[in-house]
Amino acid sequence: MVSQRERLKDIMVDMARGRDIGNKLEFDPRDKRVKPVSDRSYSSPYSYPDPDGAMNISKTDADLFGEGARRDGRIVITTAILEDLEKDVAVPVHFSGNASERVFHLLGGGVDGVRFHGSLIAVDDPGHIRVQTIGFETDDVRLILEWSDIEGQKESLKAVAANALGMIRDGGEWVQVAVDLVPVKEELFSRFGGLLETNALADAKVAIFGQGSGGSHIAIELVKSGVGRFHLIDHDRLEVCNVARHQCDLADIGRLKVRAMADAIKRKNPYADVTTWPLKAEWEQFETVLEIVREVDLVFAATDSHASKLLINQACVQEGKTCIFAGAHRRAHGGQVIRVRPGKSICFQCFSMLLPDQVQDQEISSEEHAEGLAYTDRPVAIEPGLSTDIAPIALMATKIGIQELLRDKPTTFRSLDQDLVADWFLWLNRREAGTQFENLKPLAYEVDGMHILRWYGIKIDRHEGCPICGDFEANYSDENLNAVLQSLKATEGVTR
């Protein structure tokens, strides 16, 4: 003999799992009792004969209404998706997520990765819908919303989610999971309030040349800061040896870095506008580089080739666009950030002429770069630094870049204008043997003097004889000519 409690439990669990069962529960206001009502339009082996047709529900029995009603898991969607729904029309969608944790997202953007077929539908009464009869045969996820919630635009998203029915296919059965509705666009940068307007950088457009370890860090930090429009330029593909320092991972091996990074940016902000340029910044592409620079507000140069930096510098000076050059020294014992403000500061050509040794002290992070710098009698070793050595340089470049993008906006960051007055910033990771910094006093407890793990702003004036931003002809001399030639030699891989 099946007890009333067992009967009630089986009915509630089966309903929660989306099974068609012969008994539905209904509250009768006349005798204030919950009764199973037979739906004779279909039958189920889980239906039980019930001569008196009534069940008394105690407080303990009421707890069964939560048992099995939802399993661990969650469906999370952006509220923006609701705008295109029509009543009783199933919309095919692709969820991303993690099947083992039963977490599925529909948050916007075209991010590649694991996809799950699903459908969205708005109906009058989600609680009485037969899950098996809607959507598409290939569905793994189904989300059924109450049409009146969509039509009336209820203020409480929690109420809309509570009325929704989120179902996932698990082991051949449909099971219910919790539903979250998230206003992604409105909340993504909501915690910036008090620092700057949350959309202050949404329309800022930046170009980042080089999507290696440094460039990828800059791109991610910019999108996390609210920058909304990107041009990414790099010809290279991601290799296994890149992953330890790169923002992408093993799942992106073999992909063009620009496209893998476009997806990484979209995962942070699905509304970001990303244009990819899978090309090498070289002189044959100068017109294209000019076109890219012309369209943006700010340029970052994170390439590992001196020739590409000179090219980007010339394009930025010609177009009057500020450019931030970021790079690590050899073996990443330190690094530097150079801000080029056309007409107001040094340019990268000036810097190369004034400090050729500083320019040539750069990290060797790829075979291509090593071959370009190799001596005729011996190779140059590939000796990149750790990600923790690259991160401070990328972060400083990003911070200076954000300050440039916010230059005409009132924010609490305005005080930084008094600190970031230099156009050349030097960072030291360690006291590297064979460098001018090897004999610095250890940091220890020192607070005075020059030490590692600190930034130093250095004043440096423009070179009057610079052929890019100065007047080379008026300041012509053998010394200036030799400085230019020495700078150009580095573009050919000649270091001595």
Image: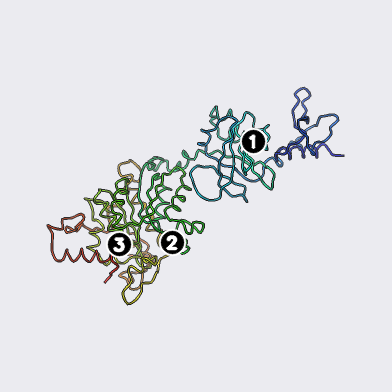
> x%, y% of residue 110?
49, 45
Cα distance in 3D space between marks 2 and 1 = 49 Å
User: Can residue 159 be seen from the camera position used here?
Assistant: no
> x%, y% of residue 474?
12, 57
> x%, y% of residue 59?
75, 35
Which amino acid lies under the numbered mark 3 shown in the image of this protein? His
Which amino acid lies under the numbered mark 2 shown in the image of this protein? Ser
Residue furthest out toward the bottom: 377
The reply to whether the C-beta atoms of the residues labelled 3 and 2 are less than 8 Å apart is: no
Circle nearer the N terminus (3, 1): 1
Tell me how the rendering is colored.
rainbow
Vertical placement of residue 146 versus 255, above or below: above
Q: Look at mark 3 in the image and give the residue it sits on.
A: 306
Residue furthest out toward the left: 474
Residue 387's disc number: 2
Classed neighbour count for the residue bearing mark 3: other residues with Cα under 10 Å, few (<14), some (14–19), many (≥20): many
Give the label, 3 or 1, closer to the camera.
1
Helix, strand or loop for disc 2 = helix
User: Can residue 183 be seen from the camera position used here?
Assistant: yes
Which amino acid lies under the numbered mark 1 shown in the image of this protein? Ile
Q: Look at mark 1 in the image and give the residue it sits on.
A: 134
Helix, strand or loop for disc 3 = helix
Give the label, 3 or 2, closer to the camera.
3
Classed neighbour count for the residue bearing mark 2: other residues with Cα under 10 Å, few (<14), some (14–19), many (≥20): some
